[in-house]
Image (spheres, helix red, strand yellow):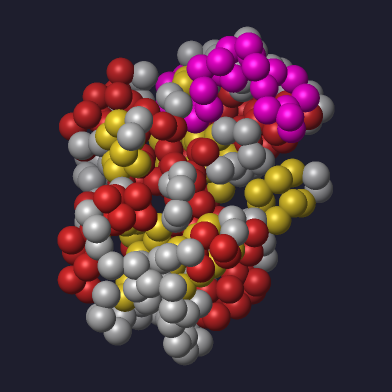
Amino acid sequence: MIGFRMKRTLISLALFMLLASAGALSAASRPDMLVSTEWLAGHLNDPNVVVLQISRERATWEAGHIPGARFVALSDLVVTRDGVLNELPPAADLKKVFEAAGVSDSSRVILYTDATVLPATRAWFTFDYLGFGAHAALLDGGLQKWRAENRALSKDAPQVTAGHFTPRLHPEVLATLEPVKDLSWSATNGSGAVVLLDARTAEEFRGERAASEITRPGHIPGAVNIFWQQDAASKDSPALRGETDLRKLYEAAGITPDKTVVTYCNTGMQATESYFTLKYLGYETRLYDGSFSEWSSAKNTTVQK
C-alpha cells in the first residue's frame, strides 16, 4: 500500500511536471526579457514603452531617473500576511498600482531600480504572476550602467495618463508550504524531477549565519544552493552573465533543462532574481514566496545544516 505522504507527493510532482511538460526539455532562452541601455535610449519616446523605477524610497527617483520613468514603491508590490514578509498583495490592488503608473494591456514595460536589482526582479515576478511577464523586461545593468555610460537623467515628473491593465492570473508560478514539504521529502528520497533552489549565501545555506527573521538557521532538506549574485557579470556590474555561463552555472548544480525549479530565499526577494534568470534561460520555474522565513517557523518542517 502506498502511504499518504507518498500519494500526496506523487500528486504534487505530477502537477508540477504537467505544467512543466510544455517546453521544459528544450529550455529555449527568452532574450526579450532583457533590454540594453542602447535599446532603451532609442525607445524612450515610444508611446507603448512604459519605464518603471522600482525602489524602496522615492527620494532615489527624485535625485535623478531615466527620462520619462515613473516611480513605483516596492512597498506597493509586497505585503506581510500572517507574519510572512513580502507576500503578493491582492490582484485588484496591483492593478491599481500599475494603472496609476500608466501601464495598459498594450504596454511594453521596462523595469529597473537604483541599486540592487532585487526590486526590479520582484516587480517582474509580480507581472509574471499577473500574466504580463511576456510584456515586461529588465534593463540589463540597470541605472548603474545607464549612469556609467553618461546617459541623460531627469528630475522631472512625467505626465502620466492612467492605463487600462487587465490581470490574467497565473497562480501556478507560486509554490506554497504544503507542496514544498512534499517536494523536499521527494528530493531527499531520490526523485530529481523538481529542484529546490536556495538563492541565499552559502553561509546561510549551511546555517552558519541567519537573517533576523529566521528562527532556525539552515536550509530546506533536499535543496541545492546558488547565491543569486552569482548570476551577475561581476561584483562591480549588475548586468546578467552571458547565457552560456549561466547554463554552466546551473547545470553544474544539477539544474538541467528537464527539471522544474522552485526558488526560495529568506523572504521572497533574492529568489526572484534566480526566478527571473531561470525564466530567461527557458526553465519552468516557481517561487516559494513564503521562503525560508515561513519554513523555519512552520510546524512539522525539518531544517538541515
Residue at x 22%, y 68% (from the top left corner): 41
Q: Quadrant of the N terminus?
A: top right
Q: Is residue 103 shown to the viewer in this render? A: no
The quarter holding residue 305 reads top right
Please, what is the dominant secondary structure of the magenta stretch?
loop
Give the vertical position of 296 relative to 14 (above or below): above
Looking at the image, which is closer to me, 42 or 300?
A: 42
Left or right: 215, with 266 as reference point: right
Quadrant location of residue 5? top right
Is residue 199 within the magenta segment? Answer: yes
Q: Position of residue 128 (x, y in %)?
A: 45, 58
Q: Is residue 299 left or right of residue 132?
A: right
Residue at 51% from the left image edge and 68% from the top image edge? 62
Residue 300 percent location from the top left of the image: 78, 24
Residue 77, picture quadrant: bottom right
Q: Which residues are magenta?
A: 191-218
Residue 146, position in %: x, y? 29, 56
Give the answer, above or below, for where 168 lies relative to 295.
below
* Place of residue 50 in the rendered image (x, y in percent of width and height, measured from the top left): 37, 74
Left or right, residue 256 beside residue 209 = left
Residue 36 in magenta stretch: no
Residue beneath the point at 65% across and 72% down = 93
Residue at 46% across, 44% down: 116
Q: Is residue 299 positioned above or below 139 on the image?
A: above
